[in-house]
Amino acid sequence: MIRYALRVLSLAAALGLWQVLTSRDVDLWLRFSQFPTVTDVARAFADRLAGPDYWTDLTDSLTRILTGFLLAAVLGVATGVLVARSRLAEDLLGPVLEVIRPVPAIALVPVAILMFPSNEQGIVFITCTAAFFPVLVSTRHAVRALTPTWEEAVRTMGGGRWRVLASVVLPGALPGVFGGLSVGIGVSWICVISAEMISGQYGVGYRTWQDYTVVDYPGVFVGMVTIGVLGWLTSTAVELLGRRLTHWLPRTAYVPAARPRSARRRTGATAPAETAAAPPAGPGAPPADTAAAPTHTDSEEARDEHLVRD
Amino acid sequence: MSTSSETETGAGTGTGTGTGTDTEAGTPTGAETGAETAPGTKSASRTLTPPRGTRLALRDATLGRPGAIALTGVDVDVSPGEILAVVGPSGCGKSTLLRTLAGLLAPLSGAAEQDGHPITGPGADRALVFQEDALLPWRTLRANVELPLAIQGRPRAERRERATAWLDRVGLTAQVRQLPHRVSGGQRQRAQLARALAGRPRAVLMDEPFGALDAQTRAGMQDLLVEALHGTGATVVFVTHDVDEALFLGDRVALLGAGRLTAVREVPRPRERAAHDDPARTALRHDVLTSLGT
């Protein structure tokens, strides 16, 4: 609860600072006199919300980014897995991908204009390319970093390639994949807005640029706020979905509730001798221990279980 | 018991003693009968329970990866239903041996055989149990145990039922819905054992399965393993660096060292805790430790 209050407070403070600086026309090297105030922007926002264009822009931009991003997610994961799992694919695709990767997606505008019959497809292409590489790279790393025993286990159960892919590779790489998706959705917004500014018809980026060319500064800020909110919402959606799908990850619990438990764990181990017995016994050591202390086994195991069940 | 592998150094040491006690130790389709008798001799007594175990063999095999040979000239024959313990210092190629038998690695030369047929790849009838981290962390313990059954294409209800039964058997009734990282290391290994056995493999290959556990938990796990194997008739190759573990579990122990299989020795009275002080066992233990020490 306190944390939510803090978050709201942080946003409110930023808006307050903005309002003070602009309404007082502060000119200290940074010049805020030309800046619209928060109230100006709010008024413009309300006007826009009442008109039809705002919603058309919004849905246009969302459609573009979602199409591009979903395509990038599918293609990025597929290519990433392929490159990580197959040496042939790595040799064939790797060099091409590495050469294209450093090119900023927005620099592909000429390519998009040449290649695609409509602006719409061009914008989706640019958005897709932007998100594709972060997804590809993180998928590739995640697949390569998979624990080898998982695959060996499934193969010795009689599982084939597809079973390994479905039961080990895809679920196991998911945490890494979502790292890439989070980065990807952010880059997608940058590119969809830029592409709209350059070549769009309708869309939040297009409208923001239009407002700028007709010197409608409150309108520009309406656009910026819209982009900010949409970006935040979409990345939160990706984040939440990711957390849901990777709920099995052992997380270092930062939740306050976890703290007393770890404290209890420490106080629970009363006998100091047990800490000495705990580490896996070395090759030579065990003979005496195993035979001598069978009763100890139960208590050790029981205590373990007790802690775990807690 | 005098299989071809016994041409090694340890040939014939405990041939007589082992046989009688083994039968009491409780592996009904156990090694002794199968190994000792030439095919056919005792077949009458086995017709009711056909042997589930499989015969595994390495013939003059060189094991490892190209450029990193771990073992050379390995000749070993594991009889159906037998428990063969493999001991050796760390890095001596124990895991390589096991992965070759599992079919994950091909021998560089020589042959790896199952029931006389070359092993060409991993298969469901040779389950592998790892030291740790082999459970899929996104699956609950039950879903992990269900996995081999799903791969075999069993219907969902049967999968669930058998997985639950196996988890009960290894004492994890309360943890069926837990994720692996939420339970203790010992419990994870029990779940792994359940997963390996749920698929009804004919051989279980165990790669230091209790190596990461503390000594006390480990003793409990050894008893559990013996109990869980009871009635499955599966052939077991159990790799460990713990000599006492090997002598407790194995019908025979194979010693690895210096890139070779140095000896295969019969174990007197395997799987009997009381046999720890048996003079024959003590002598064997001394021999094994000496040969590993050099």
Image (tube, grey):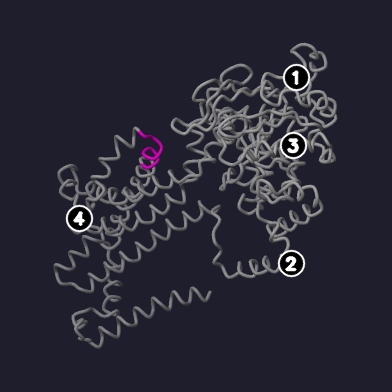
- The residue carrying mark 4 is A201
Q: What residue is pinned by disc 2?
A: A270
Residue type marked 2: Thr
Looking at the rendered image, the disc whose residue lies closer to the viewer, 2 or 4, is: 2
Could you say which quadrant of the image residue A237 lies in?
Answer: bottom left
> CA–CA distance between discs 3 and 2?
34 Å
Is A2 situated above or below B195? below
Residue A298 location (% of width, % of height):
78, 53
**What separation in Å lies between label 4 and label 1 (alpha carbons)?**
77 Å
Neighbourhood count class around disc 2 (C-alpha, 10 Å): few under 14, some 14–19, many 20 upward: few
Q: Say which of A129 and A207 sits in front.
A: A129
**Disc 4 residue crowd, few under 14, some 14–19, many 20+, Cα 10 Å:** some
Q: Are marks 4 and 1 on the same chain?
A: no
Q: Secondary structure at mark 2?
A: loop
Question: Label 1 crowding class (10 Å Cα cut-off): few <14, some 14-19, many 20+?
Answer: few
For the record, the magenta segment spans: A80-87
Q: Nearer the viewer, mark 4 or mark 1?
A: 1
Cβ atoms under marks 4 and 1 closer than 8 Å: no
- Image mark 4: chain: A
Mark 2 to mark 4: distance in Å?
Answer: 71 Å
Residue bearing the label numbered 1: B50
Which circle marks residue B247 in the picture?
A: 3
Viewer-proximal residue among B106 and A52? B106
Mark 1 belongs to chain: B
Q: Is residue B286 above or below residue B112?
A: below
Of all residues, the one furthest to the bottom in this rendering is A24
- Numbered disc in front, either 3 or 2: 3
**Front one among B184 and A249:** B184
Residues indicated by labels 3 and 1 sit on the same polypeptide chain:
yes
The amino acid type of the residue labelled 3 equals: Leu
> Which structural element holds mark 4?
loop
Amino acid residing under circle 4: Gln
